Image (cartoon, rainbow, N blue to C red):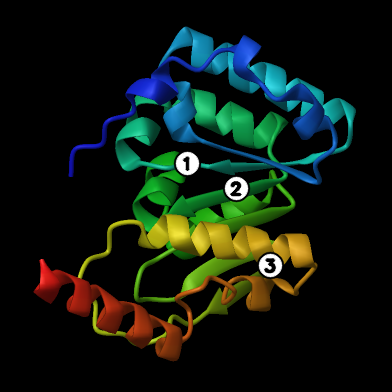
Amino acid sequence: MNTYLGACREFKKEDLPRQIIENSRFFYFTGYMWDTENQKAAVREAVSIAKKKGVRIIFDAADPFAVKRYREDFLQLIKNDADVVLANAQESELLTGESIAKAVRILGEHVEIAVVKNGAKHTHIYSGGNHITVSSFKADVMDTTGAGDNFSAGFIYGLIKGYPLHIAARSHPLSHPKPLKRLVHRYRMISKSM
């Protein structure tokens, strides 16, 4: 997969929706926002605004290639700024040098909640000294593109709603087979008509 992040690379401090950040409960950003100096400045400014207003900061590592490029920066962001960190198995291993179960604990020692997504295997969550595993549901996988982003969106939705972490981890729209089957069926019908 080749991702084009052109517009993202142009983002700068002047583009920040300051009032929206100040009035939010959560501020979410990803490792994709760390490729240019103007992006870094924008993220640092947004994090500063969020921290001053008590907004919880969610950092999603986003991509193993980004973690390889900016590992030390990401670790500093996790240790100094993030309240919640989201990573997939490969990203967590690159960040910590450890396997998933150890990696989630290491990350969780620096944040309120650490989440390691592991595809069709268990999701690992570490919070308040507790390690939780949440099983994935079974599905006929056609394409995993966006699966981690879908999980993250649902998890954040669960946090916003105040769900327990094990419920938040199952809150993404495709976590239940019936909606997934309907979506897959709709996709197949559209594909056939093209």
> Residue 88's x, y, as percent?
42, 55
Q: Look at the numbered discs 2 and 1 and tell me whether their residues touch, using CB distance below 8 Å.
A: yes
Image side of residue 60 versus residue 158, left or right: left
Q: Secondary structure at mark 1?
A: loop
Q: Look at the numbered discs 1 and 3 and tell me whether their residues touch, using CB distance below 8 Å.
A: no
Image vertical order of residue 32 relative to residue 105, above or below: above
| Marked residue nearer the N-terminal end (3 or 2) | 2
- Give the residue displayed 15% in from the left and 70% down from the top: 191
Q: CA distance from mark 1 to mark 3?
A: 19 Å
> Residue 181's x, y, as percent?
34, 87
Camera-side residue: 71 or 185? Answer: 185
Q: Amino acid at mark 1?
A: Ala
Image side of residue 137 versus residue 139, left or right: right
Residue that numbered label 1 is attached to: 61
Quadrant containing the N terminus in the rendered view? top left
Camera-side residue: 36 or 99? Answer: 36
- Give the residue displayed 68% in from the left and 38% down from the top: 82
Residue that numbered label 3 is attached to: 158
Residue that numbered label 2 is attached to: 85
